[in-house]
Image: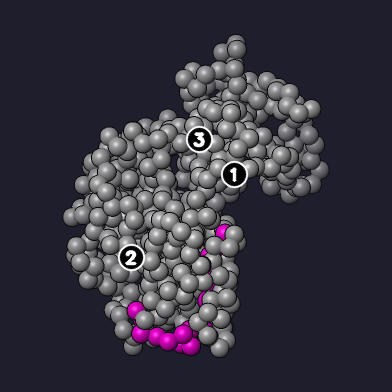
């Protein structure tokens, strides 16, 4: 028995095509991903009685009931639209896990659909000519690009406070490409050298372009149900062993007390306190890489190495690459597969725990950890092979 | 000026309707020294807002004010080149006139002390 009141499993995963150009219809993307996830589980739309989804509210995804209509589902026992302040796409699966565990619903469909228009926070925009509220303390100074500038400040502060080098960050970017080469879905599949990483365009010094993930059009989806139900479905059972959220004090991307780690440390502490396993049991880690800083934070917060020790621990990338002792972001993460905004880490973990992922399969993987986001909106899950 | 709780003396920025430490709602804008340290900074090389295209590169910084540990405000660093900056350096406030407003900006402390 897990820490949840009834055991919950992820029984299906699916993807739409992932593209770098064009403006596809978000309903079409969502439909393709949801249908693929249901097919994967061996379920029909009306087997679903709950939908949770995460979006920015910028037209980047259909609402939960919008997806219900797309799929022709008669009624929902739970539906939830989670907006952009939670643990990215994983928020939808965290929500569904609680709903299924509680008995409010039996089988939930979750998805994250995102477009380049919504996901490309680095785009040039026209800002406000005047600002009120908290914005008056940031807009006049030119803070913009979503959290890009705050990530530049985090990287600078980490290097000053904890030491290490820009190459440590580069190892996350290089690792993504190594794994991405083995993933047909990945959009950036050219090998990357440290020289190319270090020489990439400076965006928010010391943050370089290749510290940032790559915006795409795409959707991914998962089916969350009881472990009991999952045992009768098409795929090997993957159980949610534990889940947790975390925010940290004075939770804020800019003013949060722990600028370097945000809520990752309290989230990880809570996660391990609830899990039946510990960091030493993890076979594969899928840790958010919207920015390379985030991945490094999670590695340390989750206790794979000590705080500030990532650079030595990563061992020039051998630790986390194919064949390494802690395979990390085995789909290439968002730096290579593309920015599916969080849920892709969960779906990849599920695929790894089932086995059969071909060239990138982590042999005998039984325990995976998935983590999303940073700053004031952290979430994580431990998954085990049932 | 930074908002301060009249009951417990806690400074808060950006302003909120009540003190997060004691939940008191008697808050007063209070003069601060304008001194602090450079908690971190980044040099913006790419603009995300068209209004800042002509200002590149510019420095965005978080200043921790001397009045209270963790009391941080966002600013630009003006008058000093990015190369002269390092995390932990003492800084002082200076004011910039812009569009009829006076906005606080920071620069390296001229007397070299905190």
Q: Relative to residue A142, is residue A322 depicted above or below? A: below
Q: Earlier in the sequence, mark 1 or mark 2?
A: 1
Q: Relative to residue A154, is residue A27 depicted above or below? A: below
Specify the label residue A125 is tagged with. 1
Magenta span: A40-56
In the image, A318 versus A24, the foreground residue is: A24
Check disc 3: other Cα within 10 Å, few if <14, some if 14-19, many if 20+.
Answer: many
Which quarter of the rendering shows the N terminus of chain B?
top right
In the image, A367 versus B104, the foreground residue is: B104
Specify the label residue A349 is tagged with. 2
Q: Is residue A51 magenta?
A: yes
Q: Residue A297 placed where, x, y %?
A: 41, 46
Residue at 35%, 40% (x, y): give it. A169
Residue at 73%, 49% (x, y): give it. B23
**Residue topped by disc 3:** B46
Q: CA distance from mark 1 to mark 3?
A: 12 Å
Q: Residue A119 placed where, x, y %?
A: 50, 54
Asked if residue A282 shows in the view, the reply is no
Check disc 2: other Cα within 10 Å, few if <14, some if 14-19, many if 20+.
Answer: many
Left or right, B54 with reference to A36: right
Q: Indicate the secondary structure of the residue bearing disc 1.
A: loop
Q: Indicate the secondary structure of the residue bearing disc 3.
A: loop
Q: CA distance from mark 1 to mark 2?
A: 36 Å
Labels 2, 3: front one: 3
Dividing the picture into quarters, in which one does residue A138 lie?
A: top right
């Amino acid at each position: 028995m897990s820490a949840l009141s009834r055991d919950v499993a992820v029984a299906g995963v699916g993807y739409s095509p992932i593209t770098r150009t064009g403006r596809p219809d978000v309903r079409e993307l969502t439909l393709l991903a949801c249908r693929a996830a249901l097919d994967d589980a061996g379920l029909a739309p009306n087997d679903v009685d709950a939908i949770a989804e995460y979006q920015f509210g910028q037209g980047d995804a259909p609402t939960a009931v919008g997806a219900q209509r797309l799929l022709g589902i008669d009624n929902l026992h739970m539906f939830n639209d989670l907006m952009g302040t939670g643990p990215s796409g994983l928020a939808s699966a965290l929500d569904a896990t609680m709903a299924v565990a509680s008995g409010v619903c039996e089988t939930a469909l979750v998805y994250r659909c995102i477009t380049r228009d919504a996901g490309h926070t680095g785009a040039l925009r026209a800002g406000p000519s005047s600002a009120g509220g908290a914005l008056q303390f940031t807009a006049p100074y030119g803070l913009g690009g979503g959290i890009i500038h705050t990530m530049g400040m985090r990287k600078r502060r980490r290097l000053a406070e904890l030491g290490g080098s820009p190459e440590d960050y580069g190892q996350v970017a290089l690792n993504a490409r190594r794994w991405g080469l083995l993933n047909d879905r990945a959009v950036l599949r050219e090998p990357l050298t440290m020289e190319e990483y270090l020489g990439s365009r400076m965006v928010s010094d010391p943050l370089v372009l290749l510290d940032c993930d790559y915006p795409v059009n795409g959707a991914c989806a998962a089916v969350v149900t009881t472990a009991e139900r999952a045992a009768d479905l098409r795929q090997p059972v993957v159980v949610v062993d534990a889940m947790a959220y975390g925010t940290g004090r004075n939770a804020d991307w800019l003013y949060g007390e722990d600028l370097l780690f945000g809520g990752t440390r309290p989230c990880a502490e809570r996660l391990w306190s609830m899990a039946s396993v510990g960091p030493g049991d993890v076979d594969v880690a899928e840790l958010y890489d919207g920015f390379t800083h985030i991945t490094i934070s999670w590695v340390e917060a989750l206790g794979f190495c000590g705080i500030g020790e990532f650079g030595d621990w990563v061992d020039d990338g051998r630790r986390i690459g194919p064949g390494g002792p802690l395979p990390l972001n085995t789909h290439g993460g968002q730096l290579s597969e593309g920015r599916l905004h969080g849920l892709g880490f969960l779906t990849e973990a599920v695929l790894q725990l089932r086995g059969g992922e071909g060239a990138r399969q982590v042999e005998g993987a039984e325990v995976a950890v998935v983590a999303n986001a940073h700053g004031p909106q952290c979430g994580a899950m431990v998954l085990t092979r049932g | 000026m930074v908002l301060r709780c009249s009951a417990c003396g806690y400074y808060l920025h950006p302003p909120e309707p009540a003190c997060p430490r004691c939940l008191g709602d008697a808050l007063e804008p209070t003069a601060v020294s304008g001194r602090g340290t450079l908690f971190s900074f980044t040099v913006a090389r790419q603009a995300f807002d068209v209004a800042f295209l002509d200002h590149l590169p510019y420095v965005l910084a978080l200043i921790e004010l001397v009045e209270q540990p963790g009391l941080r405000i966002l600013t630009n660093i003006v008058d000093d080149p990015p190369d002269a900056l390092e995390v932990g350096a003492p800084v002082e406030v200076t004011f910039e006139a812009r569009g009829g407003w006076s906005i606080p900006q920071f620069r390296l402390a001229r007397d070299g002390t905190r």
